[in-house]
Amino acid sequence: MSSLTWAVAAVVTDQAGRVLLCRRSGPGRRWALPGGRPRRDESPLAAAVREIRAETGWAVDLVDLVGLYRLGEPGVPRPPAGRSGALPDVLVHVFRARVRGDAPAATPVGGCDLRWYPPEGLPEALTPTTRAAVADVLAGRSGVLREPRPDPVPPGPRGEPRSAPADGENAVPR
């Protein structure tokens, strides 16, 4: 049986349209969306609201589901269907959220460097899921199913190379 880990995150915006990002300490520090893991018997919606408040201090209203994003390493072969690999699959519910009020409602738990960024001025060091989810939000998409792009891109029907998506991941808008 495959090991599946569920997670939640959100593209959180303020009244000015800026995006809230979190950077954890440690090696390879990249900016990511705030979020975490649901507790046992907790819905993705409740988990997202709880995790965002704990991590950032902000109370949020969830607007909609941007999509489901499967985390994985491009180029790493996936195990055959029905077989689990060395690392668990992670499926992230990414929501669109807006902050309530003009200031955080609580003190964040810490461990995360929080900053607001305008959409046109995002940092380069973003996680692939963060980059894809913010691009989907800015494009007005919802109901996206996204997983890492297989590497290399398979040839087209006549052997010519296919063009890969610019963000390095496959998206299936719904």
Image: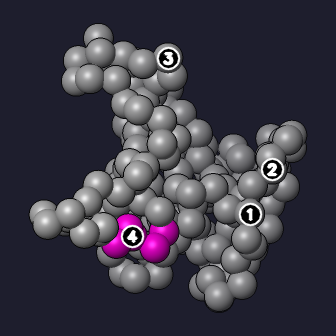
Front disc: 2 or 3: 3
Question: How busy is the neighbourhood of tag 3: few (under 14 within 10 Å), some, or many (20 plus)?
Answer: few
Q: As shown in the figure, which amino acid type bears the numbered disc 2?
A: Arg
* Residue indicated by mark 1: 125
- Residue contact at pointers 4 and 3, CB within 8 angstroms: no
Q: Pick out the residue farthest to the left.
A: 157
Q: As shown in the figure, which amino acid type bears the numbered disc 1?
A: Ala
Rounded to the nearest angstrom, the CA distance separating label 4 from label 3 is 27 Å
Q: Secondary structure at mark 2?
A: loop
Front disc: 1 or 3: 3
Q: As shown in the figure, which amino acid type bears the numbered disc 3?
A: Ala
Residue 17 lies, in percent from the top left, at 60, 85
> Which region of the structure is painted magenta?
163-167
In this image, 2 relative to 52: left or right? left
Rounded to the nearest angstrom, the CA distance separating label 1 from label 4 is 19 Å
State which quarter of the image contains the C terminus.
bottom left
State which quarter of the image contains the N terminus.
top left
Q: Is residue 93 above or below residue 96?
A: above
* Residue nearer the viewer, 117 or 164: 164
Rounded to the nearest angstrom, the CA distance separating label 1 from label 2 is 8 Å
Sooner in the amino-acid sequence: mark 4 or mark 3:
3
